[in-house]
Amino acid sequence: MKYDIAIIGAGVIGSAIARELSMYDVQVLLLEKGNDVSLGASKANSGIVHGGYDARHGTLKSRLSYPGNQRFAQWEQELGFGYEKRGSLVLAFSQEQREQLAHLKQNGELNGVPDLRIIERNEILDLEPNCNPEVQAALHAPHVGICSPYELTIALAENAIANGVDLRLMSAVVRIEVTPQGYHLHTREGRVYQARRVINAAGVHAGEIARLMGITDIRIDPRKGQYLVFRKGTGDMVRQVLFQVPSAAGKGVLVTSTYHGNLMIGPNAQDADSPEDLDTDAETLKKVLATAQQSLPGCTASEYIRSYSGIRATSSTRDFIIRREDHLPGCIQVAGIDSPGLTAAPMIADMVLDLLREDGLALQPDSQAARTRRRIIERVPWSEMLPMKEANELTKLPPGNPERVVCRCEQVREATIRDSLHRGILVTSTDGVKRRTRAGMGMCQGKFCGPRVTALIAGEYGLNEQDVTQRGPGSGVDPRRVLRGEL
């Protein structure tokens, strides 16, 4: 089959572009090198819908950030992925930092961001009683939000697939032939796909994909950030997103609640050895915690449950790279999409469609396409969770009962997991189910539910349990070892 458009990369940007294109009468291919969507920076970031005041005025980031922020409420209504407007505070602890707040406010106003205010200690502590009382002032940005970034990416991809987009997982592009008719995309698995146009949305690998087409001026410098996540319910310690005054390295260590109520802190910023360098280390995490405690002194390691890291696709220009290649008809680059790329995603997708139109693609609306997608899970506050004794009793229901609790910590039922497996994306890893349902995100981090989720995946798809992995190829764990207490 020959496609009108091939998109390389099924992160939030590639999936957002695919979803917008699915509203039109075009054949779209979405290629992803991993075994699921949202496996790169799209799952490993802060989940902040930024306010648009930080991006340097005049950059593409500054043009797309606040307008993107304003689209998230509509996206949440259509896609049901988990978004909430919270507001943010950029905290200043000295006169020098207070002066930087004024510069941030001025920059934000130049970017068209309304309602920015510099507030004093008493108002800060009214808004955030657990904030460090030594704070002197803060920039208040009421339009900042939080979201679940991996649930967003999954929702975008599911909606696109329901509208006819062809998603191919485990399809790493290793060679691109430019032909008079378009492009031949060769994958590591030996498949060849033909498309008239190609969109490079490969995240941290965008520079490599560009070089496959002879484009050498796109350089991506991988930057790693490490995070700590705390148990569900700890997110109640903060009402808004707490930032510190940014530095040249980025927005610094933030303190936030996740959409589902976990306190989260991070990231730091460090050069990564490679795009695949996702290790965390105790020394760095201690520094992240100490820095976060400057904003929230009550944040301690006692309720920490998990650490992770993400790689930012920072371009050598320090701005987004979104352009047509004049010497390669039908080729569009979407590279260097680091922060605030998640926030800007709606506008980036619109911009890419405009570039396709400039390239001569006639986009005729598809009257059958739908903009909505049914959410998988509802947010359940910690205070409304069942007592563990009741949840444990529900785990004893027989397999096949839709009300059987599979994950005790997050109280995820069997029906929810089965639903998540039949939405157009083949989910063959327990982490894939975790991102969709939260099974495995609680205190025990999957020790109880992991084998049970494995059995459900295998049963739904007719697989052997040994074919179900934790993260993908090479990450398989025999679940019976967990049940025997060997892991």
Image: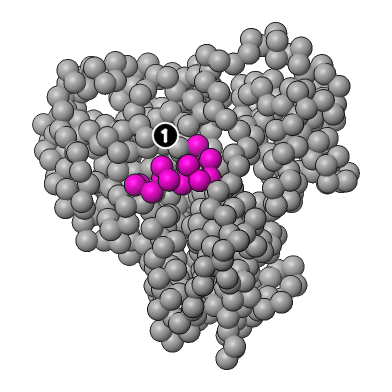
Residue 288 position in % (x across, y down): 40, 32
- Residue visible at 66% across and 22% down in the picture: 411
Q: Quadrant of residue 410?
A: top right
Q: In the rendered view, tell whether residue 47 sits above or below residue 138.
A: below
Q: Quadrant of residue 24?
A: bottom right
Q: Which stretch did the figure color magenta?
A: 69-82
* Prevailing SS of the magenta stretch: helix
138 left or right of 475 in image: left
Q: In the rendered view, tell whether residue 162 sits above or below residue 146.
A: below
Q: Can you name the residue that lies furthest to the front here? A: 367
Residue 179 position in % (x across, y down): 59, 88
Q: Residue 289 or 145: which is nearer the viewer? A: 145
Q: Is residue 294 visible?
A: yes
Element under disc 1: strand
- Residue visible at 48% across and 32% down in the picture: 259
- Residue visible at 45% across and 37% down in the picture: 83
Q: Residue 150 or 173: which is nearer the viewer? A: 150
Q: Quadrant of the C terminus?
A: top right
Q: Is residue 78 magenta?
A: yes
Say how the picture is coloured.
one colour
163 left or right of 318 in image: right
Q: Is residue 412 magenta?
A: no
Residue 335 position in % (x across, y down): 44, 64
Residue 345 position in % (x across, y down): 43, 54
| Amino acid bearing label 1 | Glu
The residue singled out by tag 1 in the image is 84
Q: Quadrant of the N terminus?
A: bottom right
- Residue visible at 30% across and 43% down in the picture: 51
Q: Is residue 339 visible?
A: no
Q: In the rendered view, tell whether residue 382 sits above or below residue 20.
A: above
Q: How many marks?
A: 1
